[in-house]
Amino acid sequence: MQRTIYINGLYVPEAEAQISIFDRGFLFGDGIYEVSAVIGGHMIDNDLHLDRLERSLRELDIPMPASREEIVAMQKTLIARNALDEGVVYLQVTRGSEDRNFDYGDAIEPNFVAFTQAKKLVDTNALKDGVKVALVDDIRWRRRDIKTVMLLAQVQAKRQAKAQGCTEAWMVQDGFITEGASSTAFIVTQAGKIVTRPNSQATLPGCTRRAVLRVADDHGLQVEERLFTADEAYLAREAFLTSASSLVTPVVEIAGHRIGEGKPGPVTRRIQQIYLELAFGQAATA
């Protein structure tokens, strides 16, 4: 069955989905994107993702292509038309299309594209057994808080990680871990504190990160938002990463260094369990 794709107000078969070659997202990476998880046919943490969508667009001075209510209705329509039970809904908004020029016209209108991807999120080996991560230099631009479609550095980081037998890459700048190529990085110290880098222009404000910090606070788990080094990560009792599509995934090895006992630890398991229960709860009440 062909997927139904949303483009600028129209629902079209995947084979007929087209966008102009003069789209500024294609020519300049001038656009942003969001990804919301779908479990049991319902979106998880979608309000947080739409909050970030609005913020990213505002930072780039791109107008919202539709109201939030219209976007949610469109997302639900795509989920229904594509019979998506588990996977993600992808949104992309670019500044628009016009003849190639670094500057852009005042009357340009954004292009808005959305599609679904079916993929297993919950019952995965990564969630059960954990993953290995590589460390790579962080060579990205200085506004990483904007979820831009300029992802070449992350693509290269993922390829480097794969070549080292790892699932994800954590990026390092000035000796400190910033974040994953497509995730937020967490460690658990020997004292049991959960540590993650604070939000700033150096990192993307992760939506799953925000939900996990709320879980930790609600259940009395100690959290410290601060910078941490690779050496500190090697000595951590546990480590994990978060994102919309990886949820809460244990990290059992960092750059060849076994973390803790080399298997998912109790703090990670507790957060993972609580978050998944909340996610299923969202799906059940949606």
Image (cartoon, grey):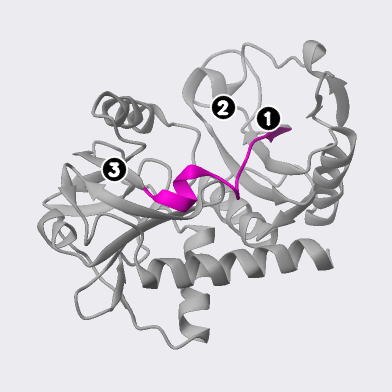
Disc 3 to disc 1: CB gap under 8 Å: no
- Which residue is found at the position 63% from the left and 60% from the top? 51
Question: Residue 107's x, y, as percent?
Answer: 70, 31
Disc 2 to disc 1: CB gap under 8 Å: yes
Q: Nearer the viewer, residue 63 or 135?
A: 135
Question: Residue 163's x, y, as percent?
Answer: 26, 23
In the image, which residues are magenta?
115-130
Dividing the picture into quadrants, the one containing residue 119 is top right
Q: Residues within 10 Å of mark 3 (few under 14, many from 20)?
A: many
Dividing the picture into quadrants, the one containing residue 3 is top right
Q: Which mark is residue 104?
A: 2
Residue topped by disc 3: 133
Amino acid type at image mark 1: Ile
Q: Secondary structure at mark 2?
A: loop
Residue topped by disc 1: 108
Instruction: Please check the rendered image and state whether residue 94 is part of the magenta-colored stretch, yes or no.
Output: no
- The C terminus - image quarter: bottom right
User: Number of labelled discs?
Assistant: 3
- Marks 2 and 3 sit apart, C-alpha to C-alpha, by 40 Å
- Marks 3 and 1 sit apart, C-alpha to C-alpha, by 41 Å
Q: Nearer the viewer, residue 104 or 10?
A: 10
- Say if residue 102 shows up in the picture: no
Q: Secondary structure at mark 1?
A: loop
- Which residue is found at the position 23% from the left and 60% from the top? 261
Q: Secondary structure at mark 3?
A: strand
Amino acid type at image mark 3: Val
Q: Nearer the viewer, residue 87 or 197?
A: 87
